Protein backbone atom coordinates (compact mmCIF):
# COMPACT_ATOMS: atom_id res chain seq x y z
CA UNK A 1 0.00 0.00 0.00
CA UNK A 2 1.46 3.37 -0.98
CA UNK A 3 2.47 5.46 2.03
CA UNK A 4 0.48 8.55 0.96
CA UNK A 5 -2.62 6.53 0.25
CA UNK A 6 -2.48 4.69 3.56
CA UNK A 7 -1.90 7.99 5.34
CA UNK A 8 -5.07 9.45 3.82
CA UNK A 9 -7.01 6.29 4.66
CA UNK A 10 -5.96 6.40 8.29
CA UNK A 11 -6.59 10.13 8.47
CA UNK A 12 -10.15 9.72 7.21
CA UNK A 13 -10.69 6.72 9.43
CA UNK A 14 -9.62 8.41 12.63
CA UNK A 15 -11.52 11.61 11.92
CA UNK A 16 -14.68 9.51 11.86
CA UNK A 17 -14.46 9.52 15.64
CA UNK A 18 -15.90 13.01 15.77
CA UNK A 19 -19.19 12.06 14.11
CA UNK A 20 -20.86 10.26 17.04
CA UNK A 21 -18.66 10.16 20.13
CA UNK A 22 -21.29 8.26 22.09
CA UNK A 23 -21.22 5.13 19.94
CA UNK A 24 -18.97 3.11 17.70
CA UNK A 25 -19.22 4.25 14.10
CA UNK A 26 -19.88 2.11 11.09
CA UNK A 27 -23.13 0.24 11.73
CA UNK A 28 -23.57 -3.37 12.69
CA UNK A 29 -24.81 -4.95 15.89
CA UNK A 30 -23.35 -2.76 18.62
CA UNK A 31 -23.93 -5.51 21.20
CA UNK A 32 -21.29 -7.62 19.48
CA UNK A 33 -17.76 -6.33 19.90
CA UNK A 34 -15.34 -6.50 16.99
CA UNK A 35 -12.69 -9.14 17.36
CA UNK A 36 -9.07 -8.65 16.35
CA UNK A 37 -6.13 -11.00 16.22
CA UNK A 38 -3.90 -10.84 19.28
CA UNK A 39 -1.24 -13.53 18.80
CA UNK A 40 2.33 -12.30 18.69
CA UNK A 41 3.21 -13.43 15.16
CA UNK A 42 0.12 -11.80 13.64
CA UNK A 43 0.81 -8.58 15.54
CA UNK A 44 4.43 -8.61 14.41
CA UNK A 45 3.41 -8.94 10.76
CA UNK A 46 0.88 -6.15 11.28
CA UNK A 47 3.68 -4.04 12.74
CA UNK A 48 5.81 -4.71 9.68
CA UNK A 49 2.98 -3.56 7.43
CA UNK A 50 2.35 -0.49 9.57
CA UNK A 51 6.03 0.48 9.70
CA UNK A 52 6.38 0.02 5.97
CA UNK A 53 3.33 2.01 4.96
CA UNK A 54 1.97 4.12 7.80
CA UNK A 55 4.47 5.01 10.51
CA UNK A 56 5.91 8.11 8.88
CA UNK A 57 2.49 9.76 9.12
CA UNK A 58 0.84 8.22 12.17
CA UNK A 59 1.53 7.08 15.70
CA UNK A 60 -0.57 6.38 18.79
CA UNK A 61 0.36 9.27 21.05
CA UNK A 62 0.23 12.51 19.05
CA UNK A 63 -1.06 14.09 15.84
CA UNK A 64 1.62 14.26 13.19
CA UNK A 65 1.10 14.37 9.42
CA UNK A 66 -2.01 12.36 10.20
CA UNK A 67 -3.94 12.07 13.45
CA UNK A 68 -2.83 9.66 16.14
CA UNK A 69 -4.68 6.36 16.22
CA UNK A 70 -5.37 6.04 19.92
CA UNK A 71 -8.71 4.32 20.45
CA UNK A 72 -9.60 4.12 16.75
CA UNK A 73 -10.72 0.50 16.78
CA UNK A 74 -13.11 1.04 19.67
CA UNK A 75 -14.73 4.01 17.94
CA UNK A 76 -14.90 2.81 14.33
CA UNK A 77 -16.20 -0.65 13.49
CA UNK A 78 -13.95 -3.23 11.89
CA UNK A 79 -16.41 -3.75 9.03
CA UNK A 80 -16.42 -0.03 8.29
CA UNK A 81 -12.62 0.05 8.21
CA UNK A 82 -12.42 -2.93 5.87
CA UNK A 83 -15.14 -1.57 3.55
CA UNK A 84 -13.53 1.83 3.42
CA UNK A 85 -10.09 0.44 2.60
CA UNK A 86 -11.53 -1.69 -0.18
CA UNK A 87 -13.67 1.00 -1.85
CA UNK A 88 -13.74 4.48 -0.29
CA UNK A 89 -15.36 6.03 -3.41
CA UNK A 90 -18.36 3.76 -3.00
CA UNK A 91 -18.71 4.92 0.62
CA UNK A 92 -18.60 8.55 -0.43
CA UNK A 93 -20.93 8.22 -3.43
CA UNK A 94 -23.32 6.16 -1.30
CA UNK A 95 -23.71 9.06 1.14
CA UNK A 96 -21.93 7.58 4.16
CA UNK A 97 -21.83 10.63 6.48
CA UNK A 98 -18.30 10.02 7.72
CA UNK A 99 -16.90 9.40 4.25
CA UNK A 100 -18.70 12.44 2.84
CA UNK A 101 -17.45 14.68 5.65
CA UNK A 102 -13.87 13.65 5.02
CA UNK A 103 -14.22 14.06 1.26
CA UNK A 104 -15.55 17.58 1.74
CA UNK A 105 -12.55 18.38 3.91
CA UNK A 106 -9.84 16.80 1.74
CA UNK A 107 -11.50 17.22 -1.69
CA UNK A 108 -10.12 13.96 -3.07
CA UNK A 109 -10.98 10.33 -3.41
CA UNK A 110 -8.67 7.92 -1.65
CA UNK A 111 -7.89 5.06 -4.05
CA UNK A 112 -9.38 1.77 -3.05
CA UNK A 113 -7.22 -1.19 -2.12
CA UNK A 114 -9.31 -4.30 -2.81
CA UNK A 115 -6.09 -6.34 -3.01
CA UNK A 116 -5.56 -6.02 0.76
CA UNK A 117 -7.36 -9.15 1.84
CA UNK A 118 -7.30 -11.98 4.30
CA UNK A 119 -4.38 -12.25 6.67
CA UNK A 120 -2.71 -9.00 5.65
CA UNK A 121 -5.85 -7.04 6.54
CA UNK A 122 -6.36 -8.97 9.78
CA UNK A 123 -2.74 -8.51 10.84
CA UNK A 124 -2.68 -4.77 10.11
CA UNK A 125 -5.94 -4.15 11.97
CA UNK A 126 -4.85 -6.42 14.84
CA UNK A 127 -1.70 -4.38 15.28
CA UNK A 128 -3.58 -1.05 15.14
CA UNK A 129 -6.14 -2.37 17.64
CA UNK A 130 -3.56 -3.58 20.16
CA UNK A 131 -1.54 -0.39 20.08
CA UNK A 132 -4.55 1.95 20.05
CA UNK A 133 -6.08 0.16 23.05
CA UNK A 134 -2.77 0.30 24.92
CA UNK A 135 -2.67 4.05 24.46
CA UNK A 136 -5.84 4.31 26.57
CA UNK A 137 -3.69 3.15 29.50
CA UNK A 138 -1.19 5.98 28.98
CA UNK A 139 -1.96 7.62 32.31
CA UNK A 140 1.35 9.46 32.32
CA UNK A 141 0.30 11.10 29.03
CA UNK A 142 3.80 10.50 27.68
CA UNK A 143 4.24 11.48 24.04
CA UNK A 144 6.73 10.52 21.37
CA UNK A 145 6.36 6.73 21.52
CA UNK A 146 8.48 4.83 19.01
CA UNK A 147 6.65 2.21 16.97
CA UNK A 148 9.83 1.30 15.12
CA UNK A 149 12.67 2.16 17.51
CA UNK A 150 15.38 0.58 15.33
CA UNK A 151 14.31 1.41 11.76
CA UNK A 152 17.36 -0.06 10.04
CA UNK A 153 16.64 -3.65 8.93
CA UNK A 154 19.01 -6.41 10.02
CA UNK A 155 21.19 -7.27 7.01
CA UNK A 156 21.99 -10.74 5.74
CA UNK A 157 25.35 -12.19 6.74
CA UNK A 158 25.70 -14.29 3.62
CA UNK A 159 26.28 -17.38 5.77
CA UNK A 160 24.15 -20.52 5.61
CA UNK A 161 24.05 -23.13 8.36
CA UNK A 162 23.45 -26.73 7.30
CA UNK A 163 21.07 -28.46 9.72
CA UNK A 164 20.85 -32.21 10.17
CA UNK A 165 18.01 -33.64 12.24
CA UNK A 166 19.41 -35.65 15.14
CA UNK A 167 16.44 -36.92 17.16
CA UNK A 168 12.92 -36.15 18.34
CA UNK A 169 12.14 -36.00 22.04
CA UNK A 170 9.56 -38.49 23.30
CA UNK A 171 6.02 -37.06 23.39
CA UNK A 172 4.77 -36.22 26.88
CA UNK A 173 1.28 -35.21 25.77
CA UNK A 174 -1.08 -36.36 23.01
CA UNK A 175 -1.73 -32.71 22.19
CA UNK A 176 0.58 -29.99 20.87
CA UNK A 177 3.11 -29.22 22.18
CA UNK A 178 3.89 -32.95 22.14
CA UNK A 179 7.11 -32.39 24.09
CA UNK A 180 7.90 -29.16 25.96
CA UNK A 181 11.69 -29.42 25.66
CA UNK A 182 13.28 -26.29 27.05
CA UNK A 183 16.97 -26.81 27.80
CA UNK A 184 19.74 -29.10 26.56
CA UNK A 185 23.05 -28.99 28.44
CA UNK A 186 26.10 -31.09 29.20
CA UNK A 187 28.21 -32.23 32.10
CA UNK A 188 31.55 -33.54 30.95
CA UNK A 189 30.74 -35.58 27.83
CA UNK A 190 27.17 -36.40 28.95
CA UNK A 191 24.16 -34.58 27.48
CA UNK A 192 20.84 -33.97 29.25
CA UNK A 193 17.54 -32.58 28.00
CA UNK A 194 14.64 -31.21 30.07
CA UNK A 195 10.95 -31.49 29.22
CA UNK A 196 8.93 -28.96 31.21
CA UNK A 197 6.36 -31.61 32.00
CA UNK A 198 8.82 -32.95 34.58
CA UNK A 199 11.25 -35.23 32.76
CA UNK A 200 15.03 -34.98 32.61
CA UNK A 201 16.50 -37.15 29.86
CA UNK A 202 20.02 -38.31 29.15
CA UNK A 203 20.90 -38.21 25.45
CA UNK A 204 23.30 -40.63 23.79
CA UNK A 205 24.00 -41.03 20.09
CA UNK A 206 21.24 -43.59 19.72
CA UNK A 207 18.80 -43.13 22.60
CA UNK A 208 16.77 -40.71 24.70
CA UNK A 209 16.34 -42.21 28.16
CA UNK A 210 14.62 -40.83 31.26
CA UNK A 211 17.20 -39.99 33.92
CA UNK A 212 14.80 -38.37 36.42
CA UNK A 213 11.05 -37.89 36.58
CA UNK A 214 10.65 -35.18 39.20
CA UNK A 215 6.88 -35.73 39.31
CA UNK A 216 7.62 -38.87 41.31
CA UNK A 217 9.47 -36.79 43.90
CA UNK A 218 7.43 -33.58 43.97
CA UNK A 219 3.76 -34.17 44.86
CA UNK A 220 2.94 -30.46 44.43
CA UNK A 221 4.63 -30.19 41.01
CA UNK A 222 2.58 -28.40 38.32
CA UNK A 223 3.33 -27.68 34.68
CA UNK A 224 0.19 -25.67 33.99
CA UNK A 225 -0.95 -23.15 32.90
CA UNK A 226 2.18 -23.20 30.78
CA UNK A 227 3.95 -19.91 30.10
CA UNK A 228 7.24 -21.44 31.25
CA UNK A 229 5.89 -23.36 34.25
CA UNK A 230 6.92 -26.92 35.08
CA UNK A 231 10.50 -28.16 35.12
CA UNK A 232 12.14 -24.86 34.34
CA UNK A 233 15.84 -25.56 34.29
CA UNK A 234 18.72 -27.73 35.46
CA UNK A 235 22.46 -27.44 36.05
CA UNK A 236 25.11 -29.99 36.98
CA UNK A 237 27.76 -29.14 39.53
CA UNK A 238 31.24 -28.93 37.94
CA UNK A 239 32.26 -31.87 40.15
CA UNK A 240 29.13 -33.92 39.45
CA UNK A 241 31.17 -36.93 38.36
CA UNK A 242 32.53 -37.22 41.91
CA UNK A 243 29.97 -35.53 44.17
CA UNK A 244 26.75 -36.41 42.27
CA UNK A 245 25.22 -32.95 42.75
CA UNK A 246 22.89 -31.22 40.31
CA UNK A 247 20.12 -28.64 40.59
CA UNK A 248 16.65 -28.07 39.16
CA UNK A 249 13.90 -25.45 39.27
CA UNK A 250 10.20 -26.23 39.09
CA UNK A 251 6.78 -24.73 39.82
CA UNK A 252 4.20 -25.52 42.50
CA UNK A 253 0.84 -24.03 43.41
CA UNK A 254 0.81 -20.85 45.44
CA UNK A 255 0.93 -21.59 49.14
CA UNK A 256 2.38 -25.08 48.73
CA UNK A 257 4.92 -24.19 51.44
CA UNK A 258 6.19 -21.04 53.17
CA UNK A 259 8.27 -18.99 50.72
CA UNK A 260 11.77 -17.81 51.53
CA UNK A 261 11.03 -14.85 49.29
CA UNK A 262 7.37 -14.05 49.85
CA UNK A 263 5.43 -11.32 48.15
CA UNK A 264 4.14 -8.46 50.31
CA UNK A 265 0.81 -9.18 51.99
CA UNK A 266 -1.01 -6.86 49.60
CA UNK A 267 0.26 -8.74 46.52
CA UNK A 268 -1.42 -12.06 45.66
CA UNK A 269 0.83 -14.96 44.59
CA UNK A 270 -0.09 -16.96 41.48
CA UNK A 271 2.43 -19.79 41.99
CA UNK A 272 5.80 -20.64 43.54
CA UNK A 273 9.17 -21.46 42.04
CA UNK A 274 11.45 -23.89 43.86
CA UNK A 275 15.20 -24.47 43.57
CA UNK A 276 16.21 -28.04 44.51
CA UNK A 277 19.52 -29.81 45.01
CA UNK A 278 19.79 -33.49 44.02
CA UNK A 279 22.56 -35.84 45.11
CA UNK A 280 23.06 -39.04 43.16
CA UNK A 281 24.31 -42.09 45.02
CA UNK A 282 25.99 -43.24 41.82
CA UNK A 283 26.89 -40.31 39.55
CA UNK A 284 27.80 -42.59 36.68
CA UNK A 285 24.41 -44.30 36.64
CA UNK A 286 22.02 -43.73 33.75
CA UNK A 287 19.03 -43.46 36.13
CA UNK A 288 18.94 -41.20 39.18
CA UNK A 289 18.75 -42.61 42.68
CA UNK A 290 19.63 -40.63 45.74
CA UNK A 291 18.25 -37.75 47.76
CA UNK A 292 16.98 -34.21 47.29
CA UNK A 293 16.78 -31.08 49.41
CA UNK A 294 15.05 -27.76 48.85
CA UNK A 295 17.36 -24.75 48.66
CA UNK A 296 14.92 -21.86 48.28
CA UNK A 297 11.34 -21.05 47.31
CA UNK A 298 9.84 -17.81 45.95
CA UNK A 299 6.33 -16.50 45.31
CA UNK A 300 5.43 -15.09 41.89
CA UNK A 301 2.90 -12.45 40.91
CA UNK A 302 1.89 -14.45 37.82
CA UNK A 303 2.78 -17.56 35.86
CA UNK A 304 5.21 -15.76 33.53
CA UNK A 305 8.91 -14.90 33.87
CA UNK A 306 9.85 -17.19 36.71
CA UNK A 307 13.11 -18.99 37.51
CA UNK A 308 14.57 -18.85 34.03
CA UNK A 309 18.24 -19.79 33.89
CA UNK A 310 20.27 -22.04 36.18
CA UNK A 311 23.98 -22.48 35.49
CA UNK A 312 27.55 -22.67 36.74
CA UNK A 313 30.35 -20.77 35.04
CA UNK A 314 31.90 -23.55 32.90
CA UNK A 315 35.18 -21.60 32.58
CA UNK A 316 35.77 -21.32 36.33
CA UNK A 317 38.45 -23.55 37.82
CA UNK A 318 39.13 -24.67 41.39
CA UNK A 319 40.54 -21.69 43.25
CA UNK A 320 38.60 -19.12 41.20
CA UNK A 321 36.27 -16.91 43.21
CA UNK A 322 33.12 -18.18 41.48
CA UNK A 323 34.05 -21.85 41.21
CA UNK A 324 31.08 -23.96 42.33
CA UNK A 325 28.76 -20.94 42.57
CA UNK A 326 25.28 -21.26 41.09
CA UNK A 327 23.77 -18.49 38.96
CA UNK A 328 19.98 -18.26 38.97
CA UNK A 329 18.19 -15.94 36.53
CA UNK A 330 14.81 -14.80 37.86
CA UNK A 331 12.27 -12.88 35.79
CA UNK A 332 10.00 -10.16 37.09
CA UNK A 333 7.11 -12.63 37.44
CA UNK A 334 4.94 -10.21 35.52
CA UNK A 335 5.22 -7.64 38.30
CA UNK A 336 6.52 -4.87 36.05
CA UNK A 337 3.25 -4.50 34.15
CA UNK A 338 1.08 -6.33 36.67
CA UNK A 339 0.72 -3.34 38.96
CA UNK A 340 3.79 -3.92 41.14
CA UNK A 341 6.76 -2.26 39.40
CA UNK A 342 8.29 -1.53 42.82
CA UNK A 343 9.27 -5.20 43.00
CA UNK A 344 11.51 -4.77 39.94
CA UNK A 345 14.76 -2.87 39.35
CA UNK A 346 15.25 -3.13 43.07
CA UNK A 347 18.28 -5.02 44.47
CA UNK A 348 16.47 -5.43 47.77
CA UNK A 349 14.10 -7.85 45.99
CA UNK A 350 14.95 -10.99 44.01
CA UNK A 351 12.48 -10.45 41.17
CA UNK A 352 14.04 -9.34 37.88
CA UNK A 353 17.57 -10.27 38.90
CA UNK A 354 20.40 -12.75 38.54
CA UNK A 355 21.34 -14.36 41.85
CA UNK A 356 24.69 -15.92 42.71
CA UNK A 357 24.52 -18.61 45.38
CA UNK A 358 26.91 -21.00 47.10
CA UNK A 359 24.91 -24.24 47.32
CA UNK A 360 27.42 -25.66 49.80
CA UNK A 361 27.14 -22.69 52.19
CA UNK A 362 24.83 -21.99 55.11
CA UNK A 363 24.93 -18.24 55.77
CA UNK A 364 21.60 -17.48 54.05
CA UNK A 365 18.52 -16.56 56.04
CA UNK A 366 17.13 -20.08 55.73
CA UNK A 367 20.54 -21.72 56.30
CA UNK A 368 20.26 -23.91 53.19
CA UNK A 369 22.77 -22.11 50.94
CA UNK A 370 25.54 -19.57 51.16
CA UNK A 371 25.84 -15.94 50.10
CA UNK A 372 29.23 -15.47 48.38
CA UNK A 373 31.30 -12.76 50.03
CA UNK A 374 32.15 -11.28 46.62
CA UNK A 375 28.51 -10.61 45.73
CA UNK A 376 27.94 -6.86 45.26
CA UNK A 377 25.47 -6.48 48.15
CA UNK A 378 26.88 -9.09 50.52
CA UNK A 379 27.16 -7.61 53.99
CA UNK A 380 25.54 -4.30 53.00
CA UNK A 381 22.17 -2.70 53.59
CA UNK A 382 21.86 -1.63 49.93
CA UNK A 383 20.39 -4.86 48.64
CA UNK A 384 19.99 -8.59 49.11
CA UNK A 385 23.26 -10.46 49.46
CA UNK A 386 22.04 -13.02 46.89
CA UNK A 387 21.62 -10.44 44.09
CA UNK A 388 24.46 -10.40 41.56
CA UNK A 389 22.84 -8.10 38.95
CA UNK A 390 19.39 -6.54 38.58
CA UNK A 391 16.96 -4.81 36.23
CA UNK A 392 15.87 -7.75 34.04
CA UNK A 393 12.43 -8.51 32.67
CA UNK A 394 13.21 -12.10 31.76
CA UNK A 395 16.90 -13.20 31.96
CA UNK A 396 16.32 -16.28 29.87
CA UNK A 397 19.80 -17.71 29.16
CA UNK A 398 23.34 -17.16 30.49
CA UNK A 399 26.46 -18.35 28.67
CA UNK A 400 30.18 -17.52 28.66
CA UNK A 401 32.78 -16.86 25.96
CA UNK A 402 35.61 -19.37 26.35
CA UNK A 403 38.17 -16.92 24.92
CA UNK A 404 37.34 -13.61 26.61
CA UNK A 405 35.52 -14.92 29.68
CA UNK A 406 32.63 -12.56 28.98
CA UNK A 407 29.26 -13.53 30.40
CA UNK A 408 26.23 -13.04 28.16
CA UNK A 409 22.67 -12.69 29.54
CA UNK A 410 19.78 -12.67 27.09
CA UNK A 411 16.78 -10.67 28.29
CA UNK A 412 13.36 -11.05 26.64
CA UNK A 413 11.61 -7.73 26.06
CA UNK A 414 8.02 -6.54 26.37
CA UNK A 415 6.82 -5.44 22.94
CA UNK A 416 9.59 -3.37 21.42
CA UNK A 417 13.20 -4.45 22.00
CA UNK A 418 15.05 -7.72 22.55
CA UNK A 419 18.49 -7.60 24.12
CA UNK A 420 21.64 -9.47 25.07
CA UNK A 421 23.77 -8.02 27.88
CA UNK A 422 27.29 -8.38 29.09
CA UNK A 423 26.93 -9.80 32.57
CA UNK A 424 28.62 -7.42 35.00
CA UNK A 425 28.58 -7.83 38.76
CA UNK A 426 26.39 -5.20 40.40
CA UNK A 427 25.08 -3.83 37.08
CA UNK A 428 21.52 -2.57 36.71
CA UNK A 429 19.96 -3.23 33.30
CA UNK A 430 16.96 -1.02 33.88
CA UNK A 431 13.69 -2.95 33.56
CA UNK A 432 10.97 -1.69 33.93
CA UNK A 433 12.45 1.74 33.25
CA UNK A 434 14.48 0.67 30.22
CA UNK A 435 14.01 -1.72 27.33
CA UNK A 436 17.24 -1.98 25.37
CA UNK A 437 18.68 1.50 24.93
CA UNK A 438 15.21 3.06 25.14
CA UNK A 439 13.03 4.41 27.92
CA UNK A 440 10.08 2.29 29.08
CA UNK A 441 7.25 3.80 31.11
CA UNK A 442 4.90 1.41 32.93
CA UNK A 443 2.35 4.23 33.21
CA UNK A 444 2.39 4.93 29.46
CA UNK A 445 1.56 2.87 26.36
CA UNK A 446 3.06 -0.52 27.23
CA UNK A 447 3.44 -1.43 23.55
CA UNK A 448 5.88 1.42 22.94
CA UNK A 449 9.28 2.63 24.03
CA UNK A 450 10.44 6.24 24.13
CA UNK A 451 13.67 8.16 23.57
CA UNK A 452 15.92 8.27 26.63
CA UNK A 453 16.36 11.78 28.07
CA UNK A 454 19.80 13.24 27.51
CA UNK A 455 21.09 12.88 31.02
CA UNK A 456 23.27 10.58 33.04
CA UNK A 457 21.99 7.10 33.81
CA UNK A 458 22.91 4.34 36.22
CA UNK A 459 21.70 1.72 33.77
CA UNK A 460 23.91 -0.59 31.71
CA UNK A 461 22.97 -0.78 28.03
CA UNK A 462 22.92 -4.05 26.09
CA UNK A 463 25.63 -5.15 23.67
CA UNK A 464 23.05 -6.59 21.26
CA UNK A 465 19.52 -5.43 20.53
CA UNK A 466 16.85 -5.76 17.85
CA UNK A 467 13.26 -4.60 17.69
CA UNK A 468 9.94 -6.29 17.07
CA UNK A 469 9.66 -5.92 13.35
CA UNK A 470 12.59 -8.40 13.32
CA UNK A 471 11.37 -10.84 15.98
CA UNK A 472 9.45 -11.29 19.21
CA UNK A 473 11.59 -12.89 21.93
CA UNK A 474 15.35 -13.38 21.99
CA UNK A 475 16.74 -16.89 22.21
CA UNK A 476 20.10 -16.62 23.94
CA UNK A 477 22.98 -18.42 22.28
CA UNK A 478 26.72 -18.99 22.43
CA UNK A 479 30.00 -17.32 21.64
CA UNK A 480 31.19 -19.76 19.00
CA UNK A 481 34.80 -20.87 19.42
CA UNK A 482 34.44 -24.37 17.94
CA UNK A 483 36.37 -26.15 15.21
CA UNK A 484 33.69 -27.52 12.90
CA UNK A 485 32.33 -24.15 11.68
CA UNK A 486 35.31 -21.82 11.12
CA UNK A 487 33.18 -19.11 9.45
CA UNK A 488 31.28 -18.71 12.72
CA UNK A 489 34.33 -18.34 14.95
CA UNK A 490 34.37 -15.05 16.79
CA UNK A 491 30.60 -14.55 16.62
CA UNK A 492 27.88 -14.76 19.23
CA UNK A 493 25.20 -16.93 17.59
CA UNK A 494 21.63 -16.46 18.85
CA UNK A 495 18.11 -16.16 17.51
CA UNK A 496 14.45 -15.36 17.96
CA UNK A 497 12.28 -17.85 19.85
CA UNK A 498 8.90 -17.63 18.03
CA UNK A 499 10.14 -16.87 14.51
CA UNK A 500 13.14 -19.18 14.60
CA UNK A 501 15.38 -16.60 12.92
CA UNK A 502 19.10 -17.13 13.55
CA UNK A 503 21.38 -14.13 14.09
CA UNK A 504 25.06 -13.56 14.70
CA UNK A 505 27.00 -10.64 16.12
CA UNK A 506 30.80 -10.09 16.16
CA UNK A 507 32.33 -10.58 19.57
CA UNK A 508 35.09 -8.06 18.85
CA UNK A 509 32.51 -5.26 18.68
CA UNK A 510 30.75 -5.94 21.96
CA UNK A 511 31.68 -3.26 24.42
CA UNK A 512 29.87 -1.93 27.44
CA UNK A 513 27.37 0.73 26.40
CA UNK A 514 27.62 0.10 22.66
CA UNK A 515 25.35 -2.38 20.84
CA UNK A 516 27.20 -4.43 18.24
CA UNK A 517 25.93 -4.99 14.69
CA UNK A 518 23.59 -7.93 14.09
CA UNK A 519 23.35 -10.09 10.96
CA UNK A 520 20.86 -12.70 9.78
CA UNK A 521 22.04 -16.26 9.18
CA UNK A 522 20.28 -18.46 6.63
CA UNK A 523 19.54 -22.15 7.16
CA UNK A 524 19.40 -25.18 4.90
CA UNK A 525 18.36 -28.78 5.30
CA UNK A 526 19.02 -31.62 2.85
CA UNK A 527 20.43 -29.17 0.33
CA UNK A 528 17.48 -26.75 0.39
CA UNK A 529 17.59 -23.28 1.91
CA UNK A 530 14.62 -23.07 4.26
CA UNK A 531 13.47 -21.14 7.31
CA UNK A 532 13.08 -22.97 10.60
CA UNK A 533 9.33 -22.45 10.39
CA UNK A 534 9.39 -24.32 7.06
CA UNK A 535 11.65 -27.04 8.46
CA UNK A 536 9.54 -27.48 11.60
CA UNK A 537 6.23 -27.05 9.71
CA UNK A 538 4.89 -24.48 12.14
CA UNK A 539 4.76 -20.69 12.10
CA UNK A 540 5.84 -20.57 15.74
CA UNK A 541 9.18 -22.33 16.07
CA UNK A 542 10.19 -21.93 19.74
CA UNK A 543 13.90 -21.96 18.96
CA UNK A 544 16.57 -22.82 21.52
CA UNK A 545 20.35 -23.24 21.26
CA UNK A 546 22.68 -25.77 22.85
CA UNK A 547 26.14 -27.29 22.52
CA UNK A 548 27.01 -30.95 22.14
CA UNK A 549 29.67 -32.83 24.11
CA UNK A 550 32.38 -31.40 21.83
CA UNK A 551 31.11 -27.84 22.17
CA UNK A 552 29.60 -27.74 18.69
CA UNK A 553 26.35 -25.95 17.95
CA UNK A 554 22.89 -27.53 18.29
CA UNK A 555 19.47 -26.03 17.60
CA UNK A 556 16.20 -27.40 18.88
CA UNK A 557 12.60 -26.46 18.28
CA UNK A 558 10.22 -26.75 21.19
CA UNK A 559 7.14 -26.72 18.97
CA UNK A 560 7.94 -30.15 17.48
CA UNK A 561 10.50 -31.56 19.93
CA UNK A 562 13.26 -31.92 17.33
CA UNK A 563 16.98 -31.43 17.89
CA UNK A 564 19.26 -30.48 14.99
CA UNK A 565 23.03 -30.60 14.61
CA UNK A 566 24.72 -27.76 12.73
CA UNK A 567 26.93 -29.84 10.43
CA UNK A 568 28.21 -27.13 8.11
CA UNK A 569 28.48 -23.42 7.41
CA UNK A 570 29.07 -21.90 3.97
CA UNK A 571 29.27 -18.42 2.52
CA UNK A 572 26.70 -18.26 -0.28
CA UNK A 573 28.17 -15.02 -1.62
CA UNK A 574 31.33 -16.84 -2.80
Image (spheres, rainbow, N blue to C red):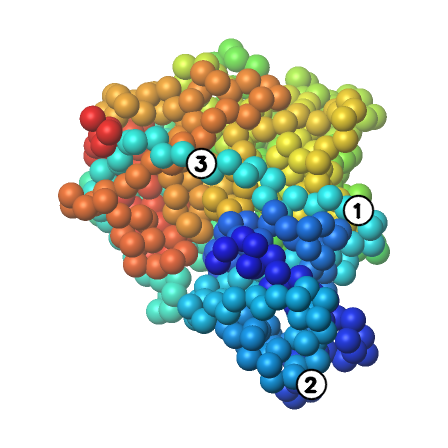
Local SS, label 3: loop
Q: Is residue 65 visible?
A: yes
Q: Position of residue 546 (x, y in %)?
A: 36, 37
Q: Earlier in the sequence, mark 2 or mark 1?
A: 2
Residue 274, numbered circle? none
Taking depth in this image into account, of 171 and 403 the one nearest to the observer is: 403
Left or right: 252 in relation to 347: left
Mark 2 and 1 residues: CB-CB less than 8 Å, in contact?
no
* Pointer 3 residue: 154
Q: Position of residue 190 (x, y in %)?
A: 30, 34
* Pointer 2 residue: 30
Residue found at x 45% / y 71%:
114
> Residue 353's image quarter?
top right
* Pointer 1 residue: 142
Local SS, label 1: loop
Cα–Cα span, label 3 and label 2: 43 Å
Q: Position of residue 188 (x, y in %)?
A: 33, 27
Residue found at x 75% / y 70%:
17
> Which class describes the residues within 10 Å of circle 1: few (<14), some (14-19), or many (20+)?
some
Taking depth in this image into account, of 233 and 565 the one nearest to the observer is: 565
> Which class describes the residues within 10 Å of circle 3: few (<14), some (14-19), or many (20+)?
some
Amino acid sequence: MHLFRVSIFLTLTVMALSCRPDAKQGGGDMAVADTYLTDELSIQHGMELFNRHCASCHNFTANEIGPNLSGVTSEVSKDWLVDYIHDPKAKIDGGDPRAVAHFERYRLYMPGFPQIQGKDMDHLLGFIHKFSEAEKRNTSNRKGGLINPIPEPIPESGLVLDLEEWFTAPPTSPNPLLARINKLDRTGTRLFLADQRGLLYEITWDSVKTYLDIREWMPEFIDAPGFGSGLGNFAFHPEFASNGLFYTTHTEKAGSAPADFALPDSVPARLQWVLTEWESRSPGSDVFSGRKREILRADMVSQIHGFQELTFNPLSKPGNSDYGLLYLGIGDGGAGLGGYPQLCDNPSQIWGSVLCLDPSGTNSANGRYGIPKDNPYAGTAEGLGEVWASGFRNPHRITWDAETGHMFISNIGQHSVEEVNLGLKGADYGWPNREGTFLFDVQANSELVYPVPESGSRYTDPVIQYDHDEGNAVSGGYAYRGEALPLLRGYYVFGDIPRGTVFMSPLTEMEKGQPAPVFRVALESEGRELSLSEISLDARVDLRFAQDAQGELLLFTKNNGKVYRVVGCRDKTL
